[in-house]
Amino acid sequence: MFGWGNPELGVLMLALFVVCIMFGFPIAFTLMALGVFFGYFAMGDLIFNLLVQRTYSVMTNDVLISIPLFVFMGYIIERANILDRLFRSLQLAAGPMPASLAIATLATCAIFATATGIVGAVVTLMGLLAYPAMLRAGYDPKLSAGVICAGGCLGILIPPSVMLILYGATAGVSVVKLYAGAFFPGIMLAGLYMLYTSVMALLNPKLAPQLPPEDRNVPLTTVLMALLTSFAPLAGLIAAALGSIIFGLATPSEAAAMGSLGAILLTIGYAADYSKPRNLWIVRTYGVLAGAFVVYLIVAAITHVEVDRYGVGAALFVTLIVGLALLPGTKFSFVQLKESVFLTARTTAMVCWLFIGSFTFSAVFAYLGGHEPIERFVTALNLSTTGFMILSQVIIFILGWPLEWTEIIVIFMPIFLPLLKTFNVDPLFFGLLVALNIQTSFLSPPVAMAPFYLKGVAPSWVNINDIFRGVLPFMLIVVICMIMLYTFPQIGLWLPNQLYR
Amino acid sequence: MDRLLLLVDEISTWVGKTAGWCILILTLTTSYEVFMRYIFLAPTAWAFDASYMLYGTLFMLAGAYTLSRNGHVRGDFIYRSWAPAKQAKWDLVLYILFFFPGMIAFVYAGYGYAKLSWLTNEHSSASPFGPPVYHYKTLIPITGVLMVMQGAVEVIRCIKCIQTGEWPKRLHDVEELEKVVLEKAEHGEIQVVKELEELGVRKGNI
């Protein structure tokens, strides 16, 4: 057509796609249609074969299987009504620190967002729970808003996150390595957020006044009890799921399935009616037994003693029985389970159909050789590796303004990936930088999901511009974090290198 | 006409929700496999094939359900600011230009693919257990037909919207938590937000 070669057609296809996104049509179908049109033009009837084969490869993809399982776990925990107890226990624990409410908010956000992975839910729920608490305590509305928005987004970085699974499936990088790699950068980002908040509070105590003494000086036993009953179970669940993946005990999908089952049991336990002495008695006994068993496992791991298989089996059996015993008195209902199932179906369908579209599109794009002109163009720029990294991260940052992370990962990553080889960049390392970078796509206008959700539940005297101003320093911290990771790649690469040599 | 619209919605929803329960089965079978393998050293032969089939069935059959809930992700940073009638016009054009050609190709290609699999009595080569996969492949054309049906209903919705200037109502269903909370907040139904409004007034007075 017009004397154009195939590679130029590929670029045309990509350009058309970028234009078509603007019209707001579902992206999965836009990708599929463009793939079919251009594919038919280039290879004739073969495109039909390609289309079904790509579809079938999504249907049998052993990386993507873990997506519905993690999403399901997230919805179960989201609907379990455990957030306020979690927040209260962490608030007690953070009592004496400067800006204690903000620190507790960040910690709650980090752990809850990690468990659920649903940014919108975390921001709105914390907006109803922590935001009023901070405003009542006289905290600066801007700082408080920044803390909630930034904290709510941590869930897509700190593993086990769905975003890293998507990146792994797109880039062909092992999800296990990505999880191991993202662990320390995630902790580092959360730590820097907390550091920034406490330093600001120390410099200007008006931003975050101290709580009244009765909230600060809580007896240690009360704090420990609160942490043990509200924080430890959820943290333990995440740690078990993540640990078993990172140490190679289970595949991500197995860990996710066990995590979902654990989440259901946890929810039953949390929602049980403890006014009945029987339930309290069961849980206390179980708590002591489980604690002893965990100690036994740790000792066995340290001294390399063979663990009794039947012992582990019996422990799991007891867990199941305790869960079922609490079932009759629990507020966790079939309705909650049903809602989680249906929402999981919709979210999974959304993500996986996007993959069907994108796999088809990128197969046609590769067949046409659309990468060549792009590669030639980038090579002609004569960039150094650092130059390329900066350019690509800036592009992803800017893509984050109008787009959400799913689209950036599934659609635009395949364009960057072939270039990584040219510049000798490890796709694992690139993925970690992207995961950090994408934090900002939730925070930056015009499609700043997190600030707008918070605005939706904030009182009318909190301006959207105030929220943006509060979020800005946290975006800068993300950039600082990226620079640190780029300068010291070992922050991310040390753990995977150590574990999977 | 309305009844036909809602009937198709109901079919998609019913199929999608039924397939949704695959996630619970998937959770249980995978957990069972983990128990058997790590604790009793007796891995099951069928767990691997079962897991991807359950996952595939889940998202394929939920595709039309998701479409009926307008749940497929859009790059809607401009779209969002349009009036409903304008949104509907562009949707209508793109359904005809993109959705139907793509989906009809999907059905056509999927039909041939599944037919070949039935004719050759194809079994899975991914595991030694090797269950038949022709049923699984048949899901592709079935899904395609469901999507085309639901797409047709969406087109009618677009036309109605262009006529009336408002998006027709959808069936009631469970929504994402943030959507529910934001709607409640908008109607002033949340006590905490009201209290905060008063806090602001008091501050203004001081």
Image: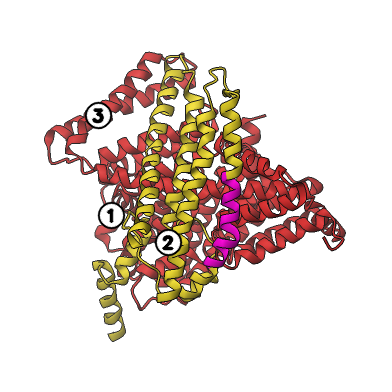
Q: Which residue is mark 2?
A: A148
Query: Residue A144: image x %, image y %?
Result: 41, 66
Judge whether A192 appears above or below B108 on screen: below
Mark 3 and mark 1 lie on one chain; the one further toward the N terminus is 1
Mark 2 and mark 1 lie on one chain; the one further toward the N terminus is 2
Confirm whether residue A501 shows in the render.
yes
Chain displayed in red: A
Chain displayed in yellow: B
Going 24% across and 43% down the picture, which residue do you hit? A333
Judge whether A374 appears above or below B199 on screen: above
* Chain ID, mark 3: A
Query: Residue A362: image x %, image y %?
Result: 69, 49
Q: Residue furthest bottom?
A: B205
Query: Bounds of the magenta span?
Result: B91-107
Residue A89 relative to residue A361: left or right: left
Q: What's the distance in space between the residues labelled 2 and 3, CA to CA?
A: 35 Å
Judge whether B57 appears above or below B118 on screen: below
Q: Please state which amino acid type lies under the numbered disc 1.
A: Asn
Q: What's the distance in space between the residues labelled 2 and 1, CA to CA?
A: 25 Å
Mark 2 and mark 3 lie on one chain; the one further toward the N terminus is 2
Residue A322, which numbered label?
A: 3
Query: Is there one chain holding both mark 3 and mark 1?
Result: yes
Q: Which residue is mark 1?
A: A217
- In the picture, the quarter occupied by the N terminus of chain A is bottom right
* Chain ID, mark 1: A
Residue A58 relative to residue A242: left or right: right
Q: Secondary structure at mark 1?
A: loop
* Chain ID, mark 2: A
Confirm whether residue A284 shows in the render.
no
